[in-house]
Amino acid sequence: MESLHEWHGKGQTFSFKGHEIFYRTDGDATLPTLVLIHGFPTCSWDWVKIWDQLLPHFHLVTLDMLGFGFSDKPKQNYSIFTQADIFDALLQHLNISQYHILAHDYGDTVAQELLARHHATGNIQSVVLSNGGLFPETHHPVLVQKLLLSPLGFLITNLFSYQKFKRNFDHICAKRLSNEELTGYWNMLQYKGGVDIMHKIIAYMTERKQQRERWVGVLQQTQVPLRLIDGTLDPISGAHMVARYNELIQPADVVELNDTGHYPQVESPEAFAQATLDFLLLHSE
């Protein structure tokens, strides 16, 4: 597995409205493009365990969203719409017009917005979602998320520590992550003052409620092939979210990883990569 330092060394940056955004591309550019969208509060390094399994089949593109990872972290309000703008800008910068999407957690919501913008254009060829708050009514935030969203959220960031961070990951993951993974995620959260803006980024939970019709509606209406891969032991978006997905999205293509929690690509990388490839390759011919 590539270390965080190695991952950073293979990336580069582009400028978006005065902010430096870290991104990475890899693989044969003549292959179909797969855009990977990470979750909260981590970064593109989330994908490191499945990167090599995807690489023979796709030209891979990923980035650290504004406020995450190696990208800039301005003390401003954050929006899913802005994050989608950044992906659109990067794809334009790279001259990519058609692509597949693999998303996780917060990234699922960004994928929903990209789908709402482009589902009728043919730009997006297929989408794989995983363990995200697709439906506000079935999203079960953990305590720290609720506190960050409260009017006292800015105070919570001052009390946040590595031990609290690790405790939250132990709660949401069915399989314990390694010390390298946890310290890497924590270091990325601290980088450029990321802990100080968590209460601003968490506003996406409110945005999901406000934009439910748009973001759930596109999942129901689109002709773009969709697959959900879910670690069902996830207390945030596990089996209860899968049940709602099966109710609302028809036909529902769902792969359940029943021994896995909130980070399936990290906890069960081989099974996750296989479920991803089985679907994407079917729609890449």
Image (spheres, rainbow, N blue to C red):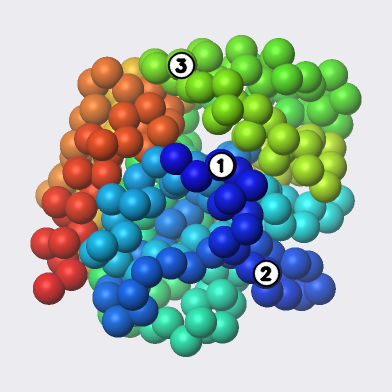
**Disc 2 residue type?**
Thr
Q: Quadrant of the N terminus?
A: top left
Q: Which residue is mark 3?
A: 176
Depth check: give the residue in front, 187 or 129: 187
The answer for how far apart the CA atoms under marks 2 and 3 are is 32 Å
Q: Residues within 10 Å of mark 2 (few under 14, many from 20)?
A: some
Q: Earlier in the sequence, mark 2 or mark 3?
A: 2
- Identified at 56% across, 75% down, the residue is 90
Position in image of residue 2 (x %, y %): 50, 44
Residue occupied by mark 1: 3
Local secondary structure at mark 3 = loop
Nearer to us of marks 1 and 3 is 1
Q: Which residue is mark 2?
A: 13
Nearer the observer, 60 or 112:
60
As shown in the figure, which amino acid type bears the numbered disc 3? Arg
Visible residue check, residue 164? yes
- In the displayed structure, does residue 237 sit left or right of residue 32? right
